[in-house]
Amino acid sequence: MKATRTLSSYALLVGVMGLSIVGGVVAYQIYSASVKSQATPEQITATKPIDGVINKTTIDSLRGRTVYNSNEMDSLVFAPPTPEATVSSETQTPLITPTPILTIAPEAPESTTAANQQ
């Protein structure tokens, strides 16, 4: 008589093969995630590395800008925007004309402020 395998040995074989397949898939996922970059090739070419070097033209541009002190900033007058709606005769749609939002208050002459302080 020929010896036959029991059912438990087949279950053990199927279980080991299943675990090896699952382990291989998990190992591949870990490897793939560690090697692959999330950025597309277009994003990689579009981004420049930060090297910490500032161009001379940028420094000159910053030096040439107008600097306002706190007194000049406090003298700014903000007018509320009041658009005036009109109706065009051709299209019958309202047209909005913008009004200036920011104006600078006139400064008093130096002689009058010096006279007021004395």
Image (tube, rainbow, N blue to C red):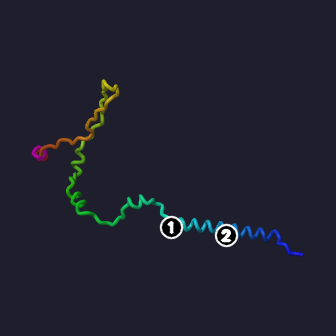
Residue type at mark 1: give it.
Val
Q: Is residue 58 magenta?
A: no
Q: Which residues are magenta?
A: 110-114
Q: Is disc 2 surrounded by few (<14), some (14 to 19) or many (20+) residues within 10 Å?
A: few
Residue shown at 13% from the left, 47% from the top:
117
Where residue 65 sits, quadrant-wise, is bottom left
Q: Is residue 56 left or right of residue 2?
A: left
Residue closest to the eye, 116 or 32: 32
**The residue under label 2 is which amino acid type?**
Ser
- Residue at 74 percent across and 70 percent down: it is 13
The residue pinned by badge 1 equals 35
Count of residue discs: 2
Give percent across and percent down for residue 34. 52, 67
Q: Quadrant of residue 111?
A: top left
The image shows residue 95, relative to residue 117, as above or below, that is above
Q: Which residue is mark 2?
A: 20
Task: Return the residue found at the far right.
Answer: 1
**Residue at 22%, 44% in the rendered image:** 75
The residue sitting at the top extreme is 89
Residue 87's tag is none
State which tag comes first along the sequence, 2 or 1.
2
- Kindly report the distance in space between the C-alpha atoms of the residues bearing marks 2 and 1: 22 Å
Residue 105 lies left or right of residue 12; in this view the side is: left
Q: What residue sits 21% from the left and 58% below the top?
A: 63
Q: Position of residue 8 (x, y in %)?
A: 80, 69
Check the picture and name the quadrant holding the N terminus: bottom right
Is the residue marked by circle 1 packed among few (<14), some (14-19), or many (20+) residues within 10 Å?
A: few
Residue 40 versus residue 59: which sits nearer the camera?
40
**Residue 58 screen position, x and y as percent:** 25, 60
